[in-house]
Image (tube, rainbow, N blue to C red):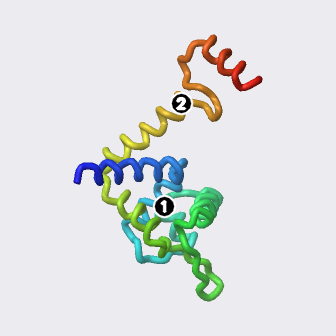
Amino acid sequence: METAKVLTEENLYRFLEQHENNRVKRELLAFWGIHPNAKFGRRAICYALDCGKLEADRALRALVEAGLIDTHMNNGLTLYSLTRDEAKRRMVLELATLDWDQRQLMLKRIERRDKSTEPGMLPKGMLRHNQQELAKWRGV
């Protein structure tokens, strides 16, 4: 039973890391975790999240491309809703069950990891000669 919980927490961590890289996307996923069966227009979303149209458009586009949000046309108006894909939907709903402190701890873990490692680089604090050795082995 404990193993299943660890796997779920690790899956949530990876999900957060992959999809919640800015405030609006985090708030959108939390929003749909609370309202999983609702459809909203961009204007209502901007009002609910207190964000600009450009921010909302970017976040919505990214989440639609990731398959987390579905689009629906209704009388020429685009409405957005949480995906019907059960695996992705379950992750969003699971995130909604986290309390604020748990979510912040996960986000801080991601932030610390991002600060300690740059893409394609060794963690900061590695000795320079170790980086030079690695460069030799890479052929750089």
Q: Is residue 79 left or right of residue 93?
A: right
Q: Position of residue 31 (x, y in %)?
A: 43, 63
For residue 110, above or below residue 56? above
Assess disc 1: are there few (<14), some (14-19) or many (≥20) residues with their C-alpha within 10 Å of its C-alpha.
Answer: many
Residue appearing at x 39%, y 48% in the figure:
10
Pick out the residue farthest to the right: 140
* Kind of residue at badge 1: Leu
Q: Closer to the camera, 13 or 95? A: 13
Q: Position of residue 106 (x, y in %)?
A: 39, 43
Nearer to us: label 2 or label 1: 2
Cα gap from disc 2 to disc 1, whole angstroms: 25 Å
Assess disc 2: are there few (<14), some (14-19) or many (≥20) residues with their C-alpha within 10 Å of its C-alpha.
Answer: few
* Kind of residue at badge 2: Lys
Residue under label 2: 115
**Earlier-in-chain disc, 2 versus 1:** 1
Pick out the residue farthest to the front: 137
Residue 54: mark in rendering: none
Q: Closer to the camera, 63 or 134? A: 134
Residue appearing at x 56%, y 67% in the figure:
67
For the C terminus, the image quarter is: top right
Q: Position of residue 103 (x, y in %)?
A: 36, 47
Pick out the residue farthest to the bottom: 75
Residue 28: mark in rendering: 1
**For numbered disc 2, what is the local secondary structure?**
helix
**For numbered disc 1, what is the local secondary structure?**
helix
Q: Position of residue 84 (x, y in %)?
A: 48, 75
Q: Is residue 22 left or right of residue 38?
A: right
Residue appearing at x 48%, y 61% in the figure:
28
